[in-house]
Structures are given as C-alpha cells and as structure tokens.
Amino acid sequence: MRIVAVLSMKGGVGKTTVALGLASAAWKRGERVLVIDLDPQGNATMGLGVENPPFTMNDVLVDSQPGIASQAVVDSAWGNRVQVLAADHTLEHRNTMEGPLSSQRLRIALGNLPRQFDLVVIDCPPSLGEMTRNALHTATDALVVTEPAYFALSGAQKAVEAVDVIRMASNPGLDPARILLNRVRPTVAEHRNRIKESRDAFGPVVLDVEVPERNAITQAEAAGMPIHAWDSPAGVELSHVFDQVLDSIAPRKRMWG
C-alpha cells in the first residue's frame, strides 16, 4: 500500500494536477484509490466531480476519533474505484497547531481505512502548515511538485528538508522526498536552464520523468475525467507520463501504525 503526499511550497505549480494524474494512472490499472483533499481550495474535490458531500475533511479533523474518516468517504465521478475524502474552505481553520497530537489527527482519523485501497493520494495545501504536516505524518511517500522556475525550486528545497525532519523525528516509514518537475516547456531556454540547475543541485531526488505543459490537462479536469480517459494525442502522452510517475513510487509492503 502506498500513501503519497503531494505537496508544494508555492501555489500554481500544478500540485493538484499531479495528484489527480497519479489517481488516474492507478484507476487505469484497475486499482482502488482514495484521494484525500487537504487543500481548502478543494480543487481535487472539484476535479473528481464531488459536490456537496455530507461530511468533509474539516468534519473529520474536528472530531479526529479513531477511524472516523470512513464515514466521510464518497464515490467520485470516475466511479467507485476512486473514492474521496472531500475538502471545503473551512479546512483553513485546521491549518494551525491544536494541541500535542495536532499533527497526528489525520493518521488517527483514518484508522485502518487505507488498508482497503491500493493507493492513497493526499493533496496538500501549498504550504508547510499543519495540514501538510498531518499528511507527512501519515504518508509513506512525499512527492514535491515544482515548476522549472527559480522561486519554485527554492521552495522545493524547503519542502525536501521538511520531509526529512518529519521522517527522522516521528515517521520512520516515510521515504525521502522526490521532486517532480511539472509544466515543463523544453523549448524555453529558461526552463532548460532551471531543469539543469535542479538536477545538478538535487541529483537523483529529481525524478527522471517530467510533466509537459499541455492543455489536455485542464480540459480533462474541467470535464471531470481522468487524463487516461481523455481521447487526444496530448491525453495519451500525459497518460504515459503519469504511468511513469506512478511506477517511480515502487510498491512497498508496510504495516499501518
């Protein structure tokens, strides 16, 4: 079972697109997927076609009783193989520390729920606030999404360091972070230069695969469809890319708890 926290230090780098791309790749393989939306903007929730759920992640984290999250899981528009713990804007109030077990609320609330899924994807807010710390205390993998731009890459460094702190201090089951370059335009000199800088600076931490900038991504999201179901040359290209991203996160047998 893989629990992947998808995070960034800067908004607008396509973090949710990557989270949905991973879910789409697993969906295509017939796997059962849970998407946990911890971003108050709720873009993953909207991209999965979930509207007006009876309970959201804010309700789950307010209660934070063992296993309570199971009561808030809903099917997505992609079918019942992809299910969602939905976000809403009130999650913003949960992004500050609330007591000694504040960063463990998500882990406690999930209980044994992740065992039912082949892949769990957590879409984090674009910060290292309490929601992202909750995700990292729960995850087995951390995928840092960035663009090939100076400020975005600087933020990626901070995110990698934050992952290291949590894995050494309190979640030894969390693997070292990987960095995924998103919205890449290889014909742009600035992008080529920043990609080289990032690979020189981070080495193998940066995934070999890069996600190109394509309109098919926003088109599929607007239609509420997985990218693997988007019938266009760009959709096929992106499907192969996200397959590689998912393959880069090797399956692991881990015990929960």
Image (cartoon, rainbow, N blue to C red):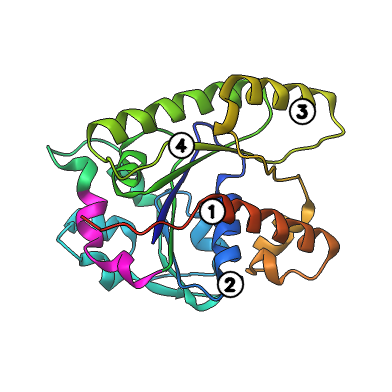
> CA gap, disc 3 to disc 1?
22 Å
Q: Residue visible at 37% across and 49% down?
A: 140
Amino acid found under the numbered disc labelled 2: Arg
Mark 1 burial class by Cα count in 10 Å: few <14, some 14-19, many 20+: many
> CA gap, disc 4 to disc 3?
22 Å
Residue 146 lies left or right of residue 117; in this view the side is right
Q: Magenta residues: mostly which secondary structure?
A: helix
Magenta span covers which residues?
105-117
Amino acid found under the numbered disc labelled 4: Ala
- Cβ atoms under marks 3 and 1 closer than 8 Å: no
**Residue 182 location, quadrant:** top right
Considering only order in the chain, which callout, 4 or 1, is on the residue closer to the N terminus? 1
Considering only order in the chain, which callout, 4 or 2, is on the residue closer to the N terminus? 2
Mark 3 burial class by Cα count in 10 Å: few <14, some 14-19, many 20+: some
The reply to whether the magenta stretch includes residue 106 is yes
Residue hosting label 4: 177
**Which mark identifies residue 251?**
none
**Residue 65 location, quadrant:** bottom left
**Which mark identifies residue 191?**
3
